[in-house]
Image (cartoon, rainbow, N blue to C red):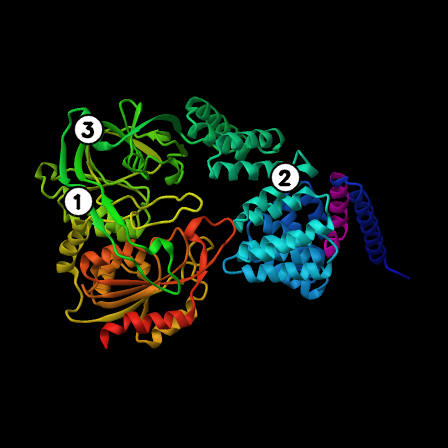
Amino acid sequence: MMSTANEQSLHADANAERLYKDSLAVARQGQWQHALTLAEQAVVLQPYNANYHAHTGCALFMLGEYARATDSLVRAIDLDANHVAALNNLAYIYNQAACYGRAEALLQHSVSLVPDQAEAWLSLCFAAQHLDYREDDAVRYAMRAVELNPRNAFPYTYLSRAKLTQGDLPGALEAIQIAASLDPDNPAYRYRAGVCLLEMDRVAEAIDAFQTALALDPEHCDTWQALAEYLYKIEDFAAAEEACRHAELRAASKFPVHELLAKILFVTGRYDEAKQLFDENTAAFCATNKITPRRSHTGWAPVRSVANWSESHSLTLTPMLPERTLQTEDALCFGASPEGAHAEPVTLPAAYVAEVANAVIMPGHELILVDGERQVLYDRLAFFHDWHALRPDEYVPMCSDTHVFFQVMEMAPERIEAGIFLLTEAMNNYAHWISEQLPRLRLLEQMPQYDGMPILVSDGLYPQQIEALEFIVQGRYPIRILDLKQSFEVGRLIYPSILTAYHKRRYRPNERASATDGALHPEAIHYLRERILPRVGGVPGKRRRLWISRRKQFRKGQRRLLNEAELEALFLSYGFESVMPENMSFTEQVKLFSEAEMIAGPGGSAFMNMVFAHDDARVLILTKDHPEVNYHYFSNIARIIGQSVAYVCGETVKNHGVLGFETDYTVDLATTRDAIEKFLLAARR
């Protein structure tokens, strides 16, 4: 006879299974709250059944209770490590929470158990697309999903996105065109084809694809948005506004549409309308996403140069270096002869020191507000007179050729009575800090009246940047670091201008970088060598060969040299040593590079250390044939010192969503070897 305990156990099991099946039934009807109640009752009766925990997790997820859903799914997997549904659902939650590595591990186990899961392969594709250096895997995962379901359009959309990110634009277009052929009435596929075609600069075909999408569905918001963004970039503002208005009427989320519309309004001179829309959009975004608004206010004002304003207010303005014209040379390139490598004359703006009274400054930006915020002093825009040349940021979200829209952070309670302005937009860029900011102090050295006045810099600088500044000033000026979350009133602001034609800029479609971008006054380079090398130089007479590694630059959008490993091996075979300057202090970098006779590597900020190398050093920069690469920036510096620079121009990998020259690239091994033999080693033979 069966014991009472066994009878009770069997009864509990039967009840649990009945509750579980009832929960599945109501879940199929979309009654997730009821399904959860039944599933939780089943778990209470039989807490060691993985199916019950997995289904509870699914119900919790559908109800938006992601933390509890995760707990239930983890418990299910603890009970049954091969529970495919729990693995897939937990991976989905991890993907949504940006835990892509954990999601991928679960999904790889899932497809090892059941290989023919198309949806799991697509989830794998999604995870891999968000992991560094995993573009090829994302394509492989998507192709597996396509193989499993070749007559379904949906997997081809994943494949298209993966190939876009990989840089295979023809492959991305082919995949989405297959999706469109399988589902010809779906406007989303025509829209995505238009995006691919725009990336390929096939503009007329892209517009046709967008028009087809709108013919299929005049309400297709993504297409209107894409059209508006494209028309804004080519400066057809009337058409861009019309497309934006269409998107505005149809968008589920108005935030990106209103952000673009505000920019269109501002660049066309409708400043008050733009401000109102920007402020309303920001407030709505914060409310919707439950974000505490920043303590700040916005405004707009016309722009003047610092020198112009200072002179008009009868304040001290001291000319230091005259405007001058320099003639550059053609850049020496291997592998390609980019149009932007050709020589042309460069105009260097006059350098000066000016005083500004009762200014408001914003750490993290070069903008200066004066006259009760009714005017903006902004030498960069005053120099360009071109809104498109400036990259929008949180301090200046938008501008026109003559006006700036600014966002002022909460004002610090303490007023700064006097200070020397050394703020910059490129604050975390080592090269721009060394070449543009430090030489400004040269202008002050002949002006003892400013001795002891604090230098004002932004918080967030790298330790090497602060070290370099301290090394230059040697206690002559105290350094005051300003909080990025605040703005500051300064009674007497001393402004030494930068000794360069402005370099940090954005380019229009089909516009190229040229020799005119970023050339430096020779005095700036001589100043760095004269002030630093005598005190930090390395071993006299030592001549090293340095390979500057960028192995740590592994994120998409960081100009990755995708075949760096094989190129580094090539240079090591020629006696180069691999170095990673970002791991060194400033003085360690100076000592290292002061011993260099040859410097090579993928282009980046660390090449600014060439200013400390031997005056006959040879520098080989691996880069790409791209219209926004400046082939003269380092060449112009080398000419001032007496060094030589050459470039190996590789092939651009056009990563979708990556701006300008930040795209990845590859460099041909044979071409590089040729450059080593004919340029680097030629002078040694």
N-terminal of the two: label 3 or label 2?
A: 2
The kind of residue on which mark 1 rests is Leu
Q: In this rendering, is residue 478 above or below 401?
A: below
Q: Is residue 152 above or below residue 314?
A: below
Would you say 33 lies left or right of 193 here? right
Contact between marks 3 and 2 (CB within 8 A): the answer is no
Residue 296 placed where, x, y %?
Answer: 39, 29
Instruction: Quickly name the residue at label 1.
Output: 441
Query: How crowded is the residue under tag 1: few (<14 C-alpha within 10 Å), some, or many (20+)?
Result: many
Crowding at label 2, few (<14), some or many (≥20) Cα neighbours within 10 Å?
many
| Mark 1 or 3, nearer chain start | 3
Q: Quadrant of the C terminus?
A: bottom left
Q: Secondary structure at mark 2?
A: helix
Residue toward you, 147 or 68:
147
Residue tagged 2: 211
Q: 676 left or right of 18?
A: left
> What whole-number distance in Å separates the C-alpha atoms at marks 3 and 2?
53 Å
Q: Residue drawn at (26%, 44%), measured in percent from left and top?
A: 501
673 vs 130, nearest the viewer:
673
* Frontmost residue, 473 versus 160: 160
Kindly identify the residue that appears in the image at 18 percent across and 24 percent down. 313
Q: Foreground mark, 3 or 2?
A: 2
Q: Are marks 1 and 3 in contact (CB under 8 Å)?
A: no
For badge 2, the amino acid type reads: Gln
Please identify, in this view, whether the residue under mark 2 or under mark 1 is nearer the observer. Answer: 2
Determine which of the numbered discs, if any, sits on residue 310 in the image: 3
Q: Which residues are magenta?
A: 33-53
